[in-house]
Image (tube, rainbow, N blue to C red):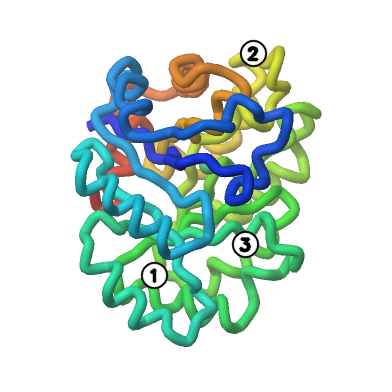
């Protein structure tokens, strides 16, 4: 089964999506399941994983409602306040819905670069295993060393790194980022999404070849058993239409056998998120 392991839905409002600035004007509208379905069909994906974009429990419930209405939404990575003393009771309610497969916090936007290591956050993450939920790691390259210290504390928790920690594709540099990826990938319970890469490239004139060195590092460090393709639609559309984004990542998978390629295109996501 082929799966887009990372996309978003929203009903746009300038207040709630303040990060969508002038340069991302194309994102200032609603993006709903009916908009995504034709793109998935066209690219040969049978299903997707919807990921939170706002930090509210209301959004998590809304995404679960969309998933209940649309069978192709196979799972939801939602948000709950992992720092809350009421986390367990919150999860006892939310996790009754089997389509809740994971949790994410927008750590990249936290002013504290050590946010992942805060005691209240760590306490929250330690609860996820008991609810069989994964944790999606959304960070920048600068956070990679902290992320390695973070995952080290939870050897049985399933983690996935979103967007390869946003590599410096526009600059074409590799060394600092690739070392961070290598160190994080050393933990076997950490998977990685080949998603969001075009957003880190030059939006107007990127080429699929620009992504190759970065996907090569991911292939070398995580291997074909721990990588999963994701579009990051609709955010990716700032740089290219859905189909072109997916084609570019597929091109980067050239070195893999057909069987390995199928793992990255869906089987790994299915297994990791238990879809
Ligand atoms: Zn995203």
Which residue: 53% across, 46% down? 162
Residue where numbered disc 1 is placed: 156
The answer to whether mark 2 is within 8 Å of ligand 1 is: no
Which residue: 46% across, 51% down? 52
Which residue: 62% across, 49% down? 15
The answer to whether mark 1 is within 8 Å of ligand 1 is: no
Identify the secondary structure beneath mark 3. helix
Q: Quadrant of residue 78?
A: bottom left
In the rendered view of the protein, which quadrant contains the N terminus?
top left
Between the residue at mark 2 and the residue at mark 3, the CA separation in whole angstroms equals 30 Å
> What label does residue 204 carry, if any?
none
Q: Nearer the viewer, residue 153 or 72?
A: 72
Which residue: 44% across, 78% down? 126
Q: Earlier in the sequence, mark 2 or mark 1?
A: 1
Q: Which one is in front in this view, the residue at disc 1 or the one at disc 3?
A: 3
Badge 2: residue crowd in 10 Å (few <14, some 14–19, many ≥20)? few
Badge 1: residue crowd in 10 Å (few <14, some 14–19, many ≥20)? few
Q: Nearer the viewer, residue 36 or 221?
A: 36
Q: Which one is in front in this view, the residue at disc 2 or the one at disc 1?
A: 2
Badge 3: residue crowd in 10 Å (few <14, some 14–19, many ≥20)? many
Between the residue at mark 1 and the residue at mark 3, the CA separation in whole angstroms equals 15 Å
Residue sitting farthest toward the bottom: 85
> What label does residue 207 carry, if any?
2
Residue where numbered disc 3 is placed: 147
Relative to 71, 32 lies left or right: right
Identify the secondary structure beneath mark 1. loop
Q: Nearer the viewer, residue 258 or 15?
A: 15
Residue 59 is situated, as x and y percent measured from the top left of the image, at: 42, 56
Q: Examine the rendered structure and indicate whether residue 53 appears above or below residue 155.
A: above
Q: Quadrant of residue 155?
A: bottom left
Q: Earlier in the sequence, mark 1 or mark 3?
A: 3
Residue 275 is situated, as x and y percent measured from the top left of the image, at: 23, 48
């Amino acid at each position: 089964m082929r799966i887009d392991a990372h996309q978003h839905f929203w009903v746009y409002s300038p207040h709630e999506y303040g990060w969508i600035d002038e340069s991302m004007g194309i994102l200032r509208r609603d993006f709903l399941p009916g908009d995504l379905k034709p793109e998935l069909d066209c690219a040969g994906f049978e299903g997707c994983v919807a990921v939170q974009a706002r930090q509210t429990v209301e959004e998590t419930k809304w995404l679960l409602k969309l998933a209940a209405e649309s069978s192709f939404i196979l799972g939801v990575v939602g948000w709950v306040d992992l720092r809350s003393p009421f986390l367990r009771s919150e999860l006892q309610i939310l996790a009754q819905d089997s389509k809740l497969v994971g949790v994410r916090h927008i750590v990249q936007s936290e002013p504290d670069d050590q946010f992942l290591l805060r005691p209240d956050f760590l306490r929250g993450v330690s609860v996820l295993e008991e609810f069989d939920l994964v944790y999606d790691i959304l960070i920048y390259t600068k956070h990679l060393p902290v992320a390695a210290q973070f995952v080290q504390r939870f050897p049985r928790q399933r983690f996935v790194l979103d967007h390869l920690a946003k590599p410096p594709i526009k600059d074409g540099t590799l060394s600092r980022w690739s070392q961070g990826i290598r160190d994080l990938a050393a933990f076997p319970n950490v998977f990685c999404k080949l998603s969001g890469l075009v957003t880190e490239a030059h939006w107007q004139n990127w080429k699929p070849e620009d992504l190759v060195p970065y996907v090569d590092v991911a292939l070398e460090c995580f291997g074909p058993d721990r990588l999963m393709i994701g579009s990051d639609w609709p955010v990716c559309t700032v740089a290219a239409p859905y189909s072109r984004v997916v084609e570019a990542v597929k091109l980067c998978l050239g070195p893999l056998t057909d069987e390995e390629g199928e793992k990255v295109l869906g089987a790994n996501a299915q297994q990791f998120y238990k879809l």
